[in-house]
Amino acid sequence: MTIQQLRYIVEISKYRSISKAAQSLFITQPSISKAIKDLENELGIIIFERINRGLQFTSDGIELLCYAKQLLEKVENIETRFSRKAPNKTFRFAISAQHYAFTVGAFIKYLNCQEHDDYKLYIREGKTSEVLDDIFTQRSDLGFISLSTAAEHFMLRMLGSKGIEFHLIKTMKPHVFLSKNHPLAQFPKISINQLAHYPRLSFEQNSDSLNFAEEVLTVNNSRNMVYVSDRATMNNLISHSLCYNIGSGCLLDGIIEDSIISIPIEGHQDIMKIGWIKLKNHPMDKKMSQYIELAEKSIDECYCGLRR
C-alpha cells in the first residue's frame, strides 16, 4: 500500500469516476485503474463497484476511504510541519469539540481575523470518544469537552491514560433547553419529575454512553428517548417539538435559534465543568493560545435563561 494509492481513492470519491480523477491528478486512466486493482489484490477487498451513474463504494471501500482521509491528513500535517522547500507554509489549525455554541462562536471570530495567505482550518463536532481520539492522534490541536459530577472521576482517569490534560474554563449548573412554546417554558425552574412526561433528546455516544454522555444529568424515569448526532438536528427538534435537552444552558445570539430558551433545573447539586484539552507533551503555541482566549470570551458572552 502506498500513499499515492490512497490519494487516488480519495480523488475518485470526489468525482465517482476514474477518468475524471485521472484528469484531476494529471495521470492516465490505465495507471490509476492498475493502482487501485493492485491495492484491492493486496488487501483482499473490492473498493468500489460500477453502477449506471458511475462508481459506488462498497462497505469495505467506505471504511478504507475513511482511513485514507485520516492518514492523508496526517501526512499533510507532517509535510506542513517539517517541509522547508516552500517559504510560505500553509497555516493549519484544527479543533474538536462536543456540541457547543461557544466553540462555533469562537471559531467564527478566529476565522475572521486570519491574516495568513494560505490556511486550512478545521472544526469538528462529534462524540466524546471522537474528540478524545482526535487529540490523542493529534488530528486536532485542541479539544473542548465537559465533565459531569457523576463521570468526572472516570473521565479524568481516561484522559490521564491517553496522556491528555484538562483545563477548566467555566463551571455551569444544569439547564433544560426547550422551545419557548413548550408547556414548561413558563416556569422559572424545572424539576426532573416535570421532564419525565416529555421526550428527552441526547447526543448519541458509544456503548459507554453513561460516562461519555454530554448531558450533565439523566432523567431515569424518562419514557421516550430521541438520539441525534449533530447540533443542528438537536436544535431543530427542540424548536419544533416537545423534546428537551439538558446541558449548560448557554445561549449565544446568532448561533442558537431564537425559538430556544433554557431554564435551570431545581433540586440538584450536579455541575458540569467545561474546559479544553490537549496532549501533555504537545507544546502550546500562538494559534492555540489565541483560540483558547476567544473561546473563553465566547462562553462569557453566552447567557442562560429566557430570550431577552
Image: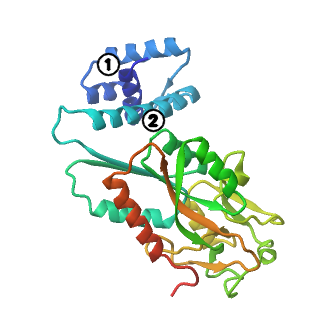
Residue at the image point whose x is 43% and y is 34% from the top: 69
Q: How busy is the neighbourhood of tag 1: few (under 14 within 10 Å), some, or many (20 plus)?
A: some
Q: Which residue is mark 2?
A: 70
* Secondary structure found at label 2: helix
Q: How busy is the neighbourhood of tag 2: few (under 14 within 10 Å), some, or many (20 plus)?
A: few
- Residue 53 in percent (x, y) is at 45, 32
- Residue 44 in percent (x, y) is at 56, 14
Tell whether label 1 touches label 2 (CB within 8 Å): no
The relative height of residue 253 versus residue 45 in the rendered view (above or below) is below
* Secondary structure found at label 1: helix
Q: Which residue is mark 1?
A: 29
The relative height of residue 114 versus residue 236 in the rendered view (above or below) is above
Q: Which amino acid type is marked by label 2?
A: Gln
- Residue 181 in percent (x, y) is at 64, 82
Quarter containing the N terminus: top left
The relative height of residue 14 versus residue 22 in the rendered view (above or below) is below
Which of pointers 2 and 1 lies earlier in the amino acid sequence? 1
The residue mark sitting in front, 2 or 1, is: 2
Count of numbered circles on the image: 2
| The label number, if any, that marks residue 264 in the structure image | none
The relative height of residue 160 versus residue 203 in the rendered view (above or below) is above
Q: Which amino acid type is marked by label 1?
A: Gln
Residue at the image point whose x is 42% and y is 44% from the top: 282
Q: Is residue 182 left or right of residue 123?
A: right
Marks 2 and 1, how far apart in space? 25 Å
- Residue 16 in percent (x, y) is at 41, 32
Residue at the image point whose x is 29% and y is 63% from the top: 112
Residue located farthest toward the left when viewing the structure as drawn: 87
Q: Is residue 48 left or right of residue 247?
A: left
Q: Nearer the viewer, residue 295 or 59?
A: 295
Asked which quadrant contains residue 145, the reply is bottom right
